[in-house]
């Protein structure tokens, strides 16, 4: 048993976990735990590979300026404009995700999808203490994702100055066709499955031991009831191996009752 019950100093019953017994228990069932870990790892890998639809992510980067001068070089922006431009990045990020921009960009590349679906394709983030807006497009087709991202970049660039007066947006980097999938990660799902397999199988082994109330040794008896042992009965299997009779009642080490009766007969 991995739980030891003992009486505390104040007379109350206390329980403690025997870490050595726990380790020995898990070691005894190591084959079961290893098999469960491998099976769930294979299941996680196979499930992510064959049941989940892979998606691909691409992005473009936009530079926000609080002056309406699209020909301004990025390196010539005055320091006094940086704070105001940084605040504008949050406004621009929301405008890029507006229905007008998304629908017009989809129309340019012939993408037939509802506005709810188009919103799920796009996400944005703001660079820390910068004037940069990062726009991400995630779709099941890598080529269409790149086309749609660049269409959004083109539409939003001309749309911003009309919405936010005295400001402009320049595209720093355009989207490229992604070569690797963004989701799912087969390795990650395999590791998650392996971890679940190890945890679940170990939990089942421990739970089975906790629910097993049979006394298997003198230590189990003393740990459970905290009473002294005044005597013990030898194992019948041990008597039998030492020459005990058919029924295990060994009156002597050489012969048992059943064997002696057969010889007298």
Image (spheres, rainbow, N blue to C red):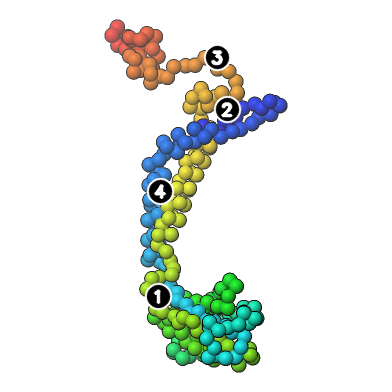
Quote the CA–CA distance across marks 2 and 4. Answer: 32 Å
User: SS for tag 1?
Assistant: loop
Q: Residue at x 28, y 9 (%)?
A: 263
Task: Give the number of the mark in front: 1 or 2.
Answer: 1
Quote the CA–CA distance across marks 2 and 3. Answer: 16 Å
What residue is pinned by disc 1?
Answer: 178
What is the x, y in percent for residue 55?
Answer: 43, 72
Q: Residue at x 45, y 34 (%)?
A: 24
Quote the CA–CA distance across marks 1 and 2. Answer: 63 Å
Q: Earlier in the sequence, mark 3 or mark 1?
A: 1
Q: Examine the image and state in which quarter residue 85 appears.
A: bottom right
The residue most toward the top is: 264
Tell me: residue 206, above or below residue 245. Answer: below
User: SS for tag 3?
Assistant: loop
Residues at marks 3 and 1 touching, judged by CB atoms closer than 8 Å: no
Residues at marks 4 and 3 touching, judged by CB atoms closer than 8 Å: no
Quote the CA–CA distance across marks 4 and 3. Answer: 44 Å
> Dot 1 surroundings within 10 Å: few (below 14), some, or many (20 or more)?
some
Q: Earlier in the sequence, mark 2 or mark 3?
A: 2
Q: Examine the image and state in which quarter residue 184 appears.
A: bottom left
What residue is pinned by disc 4?
Answer: 36
Q: In front here: 128 or 11? A: 128
> Dot 4 surroundings within 10 Å: few (below 14), some, or many (20 or more)?
many
Task: Give the number of the mark in front: 4 or 1.
Answer: 1
Q: Examine the image and state in which quarter residue 223 appears.
A: top right
Q: Residue at x 40, y 14 (%)?
A: 249
């Amino acid at each position: 048993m991995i739980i030891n019950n003992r009486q505390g100093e104040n007379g109350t019953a206390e329980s403690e976990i025997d870490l050595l017994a726990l380790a020995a228990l898990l070691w005894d069932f190591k084959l079961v735990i290893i098999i469960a870990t491998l099976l769930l790892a294979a299941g996680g890998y196979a499930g992510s590979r064959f049941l989940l639809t892979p998606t691909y992510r691409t992005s473009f980067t936009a530079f926000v300026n609080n002056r309406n001068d699209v020909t301004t070089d990025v390196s010539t922006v005055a320091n006094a404009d940086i704070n105001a431009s940084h605040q504008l990045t949050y406004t621009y990020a929301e405008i890029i995700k507006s229905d007008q921009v998304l629908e017009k960009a989809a129309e340019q590349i012939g993408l037939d999808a509802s506005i709810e679906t188009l919103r799920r394709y796009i996400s944005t983030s703001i660079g820390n203490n910068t004037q940069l807006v990062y726009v991400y497009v995630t779709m099941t087709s890598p080529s269409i994702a790149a086309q749609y991202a660049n269409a959004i970049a083109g539409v939003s660039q001309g749309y911003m100055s009309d919405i936010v007066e005295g400001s402009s947006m320049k595209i720093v980097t355009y989207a490229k066709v992604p070569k690797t999938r963004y989701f799912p990660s087969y390795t990650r799902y395999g590791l998650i499955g392996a971890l679940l397999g190890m945890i679940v199988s170990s939990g089942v082994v421990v739970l089975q031991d906790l629910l097993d109330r049979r006394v298997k040794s003198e230590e189990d008896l003393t740990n459970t009831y905290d009473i002294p042992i005044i005597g013990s009965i030898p194992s019948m299997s041990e008597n039998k191996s030492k020459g005990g009779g058919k029924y295990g009642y060994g009156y002597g080490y050489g012969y048992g009752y059943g064997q002696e009766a057969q010889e007298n007969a």
